[in-house]
Amino acid sequence: MEHLTQRDIKALNDCIRKIYSDLEMQSLPTTIISATSKVIPSDIAAIQDLDTRKGAVTTVSINAQFEAVDALNRYIYDHPTLSLLFIGKVKPHPFRDDIERALLRNRLQLNEANKISDMLTNSQFRSLALFNEWHRPNGIEYQLGMPLLHSKDFLTGISFNRGKVDFSEEERLILNILGHHIRQAFKNAEVIGRIREDKTGIGTMLMDGKAKDLPIEYMKFLGITLREAEILYWTAQGKTNAEISIILNISLNTVKTHLAHIYQKLGVENRVAAARLVIEKEAHHGNILA
């Protein structure tokens, strides 16, 4: 069974901290590619959007230039994972039966980190137009990838590509661990963006630590107290329970109790979900401040 060394774990923690440090949706993909490339070395690493309505790929962030961009879109149906994710929307894969058997045999999930070599033999892969028109011109033999965000019309994914050595099981494990944090980082950036766009100023007050300035009617609407709003703010700022207890001059147990009450009142499990819910409730019930 694959395992990570202490060095791997330290590098992984550094990567996760870097990913969470960027709260800007526009720059986040570049930050993710920069951070993850340090723990999963590759020749080309990219975050890409696939428009499932058009079957076209748009590169969002990449760490190197590549050739034959048009070929990637022309032969996207040759990609083993994407061909299964979009059955009925793209041309059937010539080795579809083999791919499905390989997934079952290797107990692989499409929403996890997968390698092309998991699903296709070397000869099968080399026979595909996608390999000969895109991978070969870019010197790429091996790929490790994972879907990140999946909506009705779009799929965002991350991929690592290199030419000489296939990706290891340790690197697959690292990407599976990172996948959760990358998805959460996108959610965090989305919430922060919505808070900043909030015209009532409610989100900005929470971000700036000015919960005391919120109208009492809004507090009553949310069902939380002023103290709970202050704790929610500092929690969203990444402060630990111990740090919050010092900032607000209350005991550590009091902080924990308030957090439990906040999550219970809002019906959420974590700080990001709580912040998102606050903004969503305000958007639907903004007339309470009128």
Image (tube, rainbow, N blue to C red):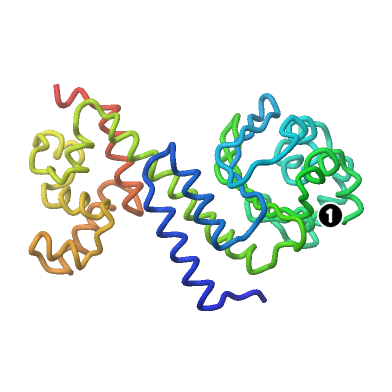
| Closer-to-camera residue (197/165) | 165
Name the amino acid type tagged 1. Arg
Q: How many marks?
A: 1
| Closer-to-camera residue (162/157) | 162
Image quadrant occupied by the C terminus: top left
**Callout 1 crowding tier (Cα within 10 Å): few <14, some 14–19, many ≥20:** few
Q: On the picture, is 277 further left or further right than 61?
A: left
Q: Position of residue 103 (x, y in %)?
A: 77, 55
Q: Position of residue 2 (x, y in %)?
A: 65, 74
Image quadrant occupied by the N terminus: bottom right
Q: Quadrant of residue 96?
A: top right
| Closer-to-camera residue (211/290) | 211
Question: Residue, x 44% and y 50% (percent of image)?
Answer: 184
Q: Compared with residue 75, is residue 159 higher up or lower down, i.e. above or below?
A: below
Q: Compared with residue 157, is residue 177 higher up or lower down, i.e. above or below?
A: below
Q: Position of residue 220 (x, y in %)?
A: 14, 38
Q: Position of residue 214 (x, y in %)?
A: 11, 37
Question: Residue, x 29% and y 35% (percent of image)?
Answer: 195
Question: Residue, x 44% and y 53% (percent of image)?
Answer: 19
**What SS does tag 1 mark?**
helix
Q: Compared with residue 86, is residue 159 higher up or lower down, i.e. above or below?
A: below
Q: Which residue is mark 1?
A: 101
Question: Residue, x 66% and y 30% (percent of image)?
Answer: 52
| Closer-to-camera residue (250/113) | 113
